[in-house]
Amino acid sequence: MRKTWLVINPASGSYDEDAFAELMSSCERHGIAVDRVIRFPEEDLPTGDELEAAGMALVTIFTGDGSINALVTRLYGWGGAVLVLPGGTMNLLAGRLHGDVSSDAILGRVAADRVGLLRPTVVRCDGGDALAGLMVGPGTAWNSVREAMRRYDVPGMAAGAAEAIGESTGGARIRLIDPPLGEPEGYPLVLMTPDSEGMELKGYIAQTIAEYAQQGVALLKRDFREGPHDNLGQCESMTMQSEDDRPIDALIDGEPARLPPRATFRQVPCEVDLVVSRDG
C-alpha cells in the first residue's frame, strides 16, 4: 500500500483546498505515492479494469459518504482495496472503519502496517447498497433543507423547511411489517445502519412542532441520534410498506432514491475489500 490513486470531489460543499493540500503532504510524509488524482464528478470514477491495467492495488478516496458509496459500489468484484479517508461532513463510513481520527493518523497506520482488509456489512435494497446508513420515509424531505443550508440558500432553506414539516407531519408513514416492529401505524422516518450484529433500526416519530423542529435540526446536522426516536433493535432482513401504497422516498448514504411501496432491506457483505484500522 505504498502507491495509490486518489479520488476527491471538489464540487462537494465540504471540500477544502487547504485540507487537500495537507492530505497530499501527509501522503508524502508517510511514504505513500499518489500516482493519480481523480476529480469526481468532473472526471469519471475509476473502474476495476482501469486500476488493474495501471497495476494499482489501492485506491484512496477523500470525499463525503455519497461519493464514497459511488466509488465502492462501482468497484464491486475488483481484487484491490479501497482506503476511505474522512473528507466529508459526517464521515460515517470512515468513522466505522477507523474511529474518530484524522486522515493523517489513518495514513500513519497504513505506513506502519497497522491496518487490515475487511468486507463490512451493507444494507441492500432495490435502490442500491448503503455503506453508512439508509433512511426511508417522508421525513427524508429534510435533505433538501440540508442541501440549501450547505449552499447558504436562505430562501431555499425556508421553503424546504416548510415542505419538510408538512411531509413529516402529513406524509404517508412507513410501517415495519416483516418482522413487525415498532408502532403499528408506522413512522415518518426510519433509519437503518449496518452493523456486524445485524442492521440497527430506529424509528423517528414526533408528536409536536417542537419535536419536529428538534428532529429537523438533527437531520440537518446528519446526527440522527439527536432526533426523538424509538430503538427498534437489530435484524438481518426487514420489509417495509408505505401507508398509502405510494413509492417510498429514501436517502442511501445521503443520496436521494425512490423505492417501491413495499420494499425489502437486507444486510449483506460489501463486495470489495476496504482498508480498516487495527486501532479503529
Image (cartoon, rainbow, N blue to C red):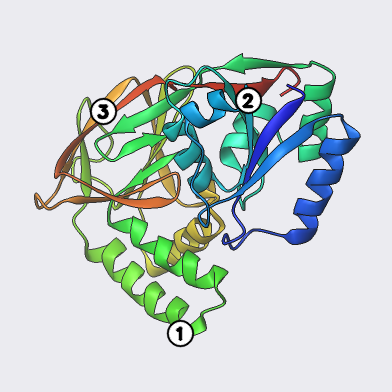
Q: Position of residue 163 (x, y in %)?
A: 32, 73
Number of residues whose C-alpha sits closer than 10 Å to that of mark 3, classed few (under 14), some (14–19) or many (20 or more): many
Q: Secondary structure at mark 1?
A: helix
Q: Nearer the viewer, residue 7 or 136?
A: 7
Number of residues whose C-alpha sits closer than 10 Å to that of mark 2, classed few (under 14), some (14–19) or many (20 or more): some
Q: Quadrant of residue 261?
A: top left
Going from the N terminus, do you reach mark 2 or mark 1 first? 2
Mark 2 or mark 1, whichever is nearer to me: 2
Mark 2 → mark 1, Cα distance in angstroms? 46 Å
> Residue at the left extreme?
245
Residue occupying the point 79% across, 45% down: 23
User: Can the viewer see residue 44?
Assistant: yes
Residue occupying the point 30% across, 50% down: 257
Q: Nearer the viewer, residue 107 or 38?
A: 38
Using the image, determine if residue 150 lies above or below residue 133: below
Using the image, determine if residue 239 lies above or below residue 273: below
Residue type, mark 3 in image? Met
Mark 3 → mark 1, Cα distance in angstroms? 38 Å
Q: Secondary structure at mark 2?
A: loop
> Residue at the bottom extreme?
155
